[in-house]
Structures are given as C-alpha cells and as structure tokens.
Amino acid sequence: MSRRQVESGSPYEKLYGFSRGLRRGSRVEVAGTAPIPPAGQPVAASAYDQMMRCGEITIRALEQLGSSADDVVRTRMFITDPTDADEVGRAHGELFGVARPVATMVVVAGLLDPEWKVELEVEAVADR
C-alpha cells in the first residue's frame, strides 16, 4: 500500500518531525493545524477567522493528497476559550457542512502560540 506525505511550510513540521498530511490507501490524515498566517501577516484576531485559516491549510493538504473536504469523516477542534465555540462551530459548518463529519470540540488550557484560539485535526476517507 502506497504512502504519500505533504507539507504546508510550517516551521514546526521539520523541527518536530511530522507531516501536515499523510495518505495511505484511502485513509487521509491531516495533523493538528494551527491558524499560521501567510508570511509577514499577523494571526487573525477572531476565532472564526482563525478556524477558517486552519480549514484553508487543512483542505489544501487534503487536495494535495487527492481528497477533499467532502471526504472528511472526523474532525477534532481544540479551542482555548469556551466562549469561542459558536464562532469555531460556524466556521466548521461552512468548511465541512456538506460532509457533516463526526466532530469533537475540546477546550484546552492553551496551544503552542498564545495568540492561537483554535487548532484543527482532520481524518478523511478518499475512495478515488
């Protein structure tokens, strides 16, 4: 069974020894994805915009591995403030509303960068 990996350019991927996404057979996994902005831009202020950025990076990885948002079967969202749940959930619905994957949202004490309000992890099954 073949194994394909992709990177997103995050400095943490090489430093910490992980891939943004990995595909083995029809199974596609995307690592916990933070709202890392394009070079030179600040981290988005709102939880909604941060989740949309996480989704943008995640969906790009899925597509590079021959998958899409419609193939997503599970998501995990890690948030630092429970009052951000509705904003993050709304963004999740816009990103994955067609697939309606099983989803978990967990409040955590913090993420790697104190500016990050959300991190997203995704699993997909791509039969093509």
Image (cartoon, grey):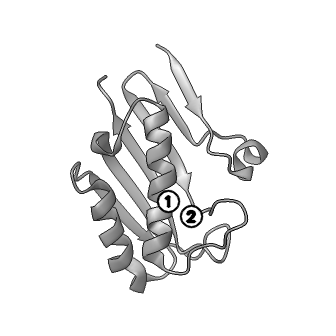
User: Could you tell me which residue is drawn at 42 percent across and 48 percent down?
Assistant: 122
Can you name the residue that lies furthest to the front here? 40
Q: In the displayed structure, would residue 57 be above or below residue 106?
A: above
State the image quarter where residue 113 is shown. bottom right
The location of residue 73, given as percent across then percent down, is 29, 44
User: Could you tell me which residue is drawn at 74 percent across and 51 percent down?
Assistant: 11
Q: Nearer the viewer, residue 25 or 106?
A: 25
Q: In the displayed structure, would residue 119 be above or below residue 7?
A: below
Marks 1 and 2 in Cβ contact (< 8 Å): yes
Q: Dot 1 lies on which element?
A: helix
User: Which residue position holds label 2?
Assistant: 35
Q: In the displayed structure, would residue 65 be above or below residue 115?
A: above
- The image quadrant where one finds the C terminus is top left
User: Which residue position holds label 1?
Assistant: 54
Q: Is residue 107 left or right of residue 5?
A: left
User: Could you tell me which residue is drawn at 29 percent across and 25 percent down?
Assistant: 127
The location of residue 97, given as percent across then percent down, is 23, 57
Mark 1 and mark 2 lie on one chain; the one further toward the N terminus is 2
For the residue marked with disc 1, what is the amino acid? Cys
Structural crowding at the residue carrying mark 2, measured as other residues with C-alpha within 10 Å and reported as few (<14), some (14–19) or many (≥20)? many
Q: How many marks?
A: 2
Q: Is residue 74 left or right of residue 64?
A: left
State the image quarter where residue 76 is shown. bottom left
